[in-house]
Structures are given as structure tokens and as C-alpha cells.
Image: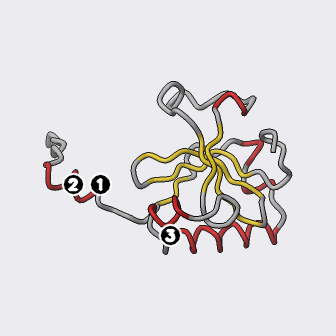
Amino acid sequence: MKKIIAKKSSAKDKKQLENIKHPVFCFRYLHKNFHVDKCEDDEKIKLLKRIVKLCSMTWQEIEYSDRHAFGSEKINLNAINLDLPDEIAGKVPFFLALRFDGKKPFVGFRDRFVFHVLYVDPKFDLYKH
């Protein structure tokens, strides 16, 4: 049997990853009660269109945009009364809310260039607005 050896990331590889300026979206930790499946069909389309638009922007452009437009809003962890996935508990200082249909938020956290979507909240039930 052949032994598999993991390649260590070089400083150059790490630098290239850090220089990615556009967001990448991950849905790995999506909460079952705030899932895309809970959205109406038109909301799913608007969410997808918003993600496509955000992917064409840089993180800097997103950060400088209005929070109710293409920007984000910081959400305190204690504002959400749900348990965090074990993989991220204690590792995230705050959440970010991005908008997809008017002011309807999808909420998650940023890890360098990746935005991990945890909650899609079309009914505004996740936290006080």
C-alpha cells in the first residue's frame, strides 16, 4: 500500500490564498432551521443572484458598501439564540449579516476570503432587527 504524504503549504501558497480579494461562499455549516430549503422559490433566486453579485466584488468593496445594500453588518454572537456548530464555537468573534432580498439577511462569518453561511433568514426570526 502506498503511503500518502500531505504536502505542506509553502509561504508562497499561503500568500496567494490571502491575496484572494473576492469572496467565496461556503454552506457547510448551514443551520437546518435557517436553511435555503426554508425559502420561497423567488427568495432562493434572489439569494443566488446576490451571491453572484457579491462574488464579482472585492471584500473591500463589500466592506465600504452600505449595510443594507451590498455591505455587511456585524451581529453579536449573543444576539442569536442558537448553538454554534462545534467546529466554530469559540473561534468566531462576531457574525456578519449580508442582505439578499431587500433587507432579508443571510448570516455567517468570514474566514479570510471565505464567507461561511450559517443562517438564511427571510422571515427575520434569527435576531432582533
Going by the numbered disc 3, the residue's amino acid type is: Cys
Q: Quadrant of residue 37?
A: bottom right
Residue at mark 1: 18
Q: Is mark 3 on a helix, strand or loop?
A: helix
Q: Name the side, left or right, on which 103 lies relative to 10.
A: right
Front residue of 70 and 12? 70
Q: In the picture, which quadrant includes the N terminus?
A: top left
Q: Give the spatial CA distance, label 3 vs label 1.
A: 16 Å
Q: Decide: few, some or many residues near mark 1? Use Cα within 10 Å; few <14, some 14-19, many ≥20.
A: few
Q: Position of residue 6 (x, y in %)?
A: 19, 42
The tally of labels here is 3
Residue at mark 3: 55
Q: Is mark 2 on a helix, strand or loop?
A: helix
Front residue of 83 and 4? 83
Residue at left offset 72%, top offset 42%: 32
- The first of marks 3 and 1 along the sequence is 1
Q: Is mark 1 on a helix, strand or loop?
A: helix
Q: In this view, does 61 lie above or below 117?
A: below
Front residue of 128 and 31? 128
Task: Report if the CB atoms under discs 3 and 2 are less than 8 Å apart.
Answer: no
Q: Position of residue 3 (x, y in %)?
A: 14, 39
Q: Where is residue 74 in the image (x, y as percent from the top left)?
A: 61, 44
Q: In this view, does 97 lie above or below 86?
A: below
Residue at left offset 52%, top offset 32%: 93
Q: Position of residue 125 (x, y in %)?
A: 84, 43
Q: Decide: few, some or many residues near mark 2? Use Cα within 10 Å; few <14, some 14-19, many ≥20.
A: few
Task: Report if the CB atoms under discs 1 and 2 are less than 8 Å apart.
Answer: yes
Mark seen at residue 15:
2
Residue at left offset 55%, top offset 47%: 28
Q: Give the spatial CA distance, label 1 vs label 2.
A: 5 Å
Mark seen at residue 78:
none
Q: Quadrant of residue 42?
A: bottom right
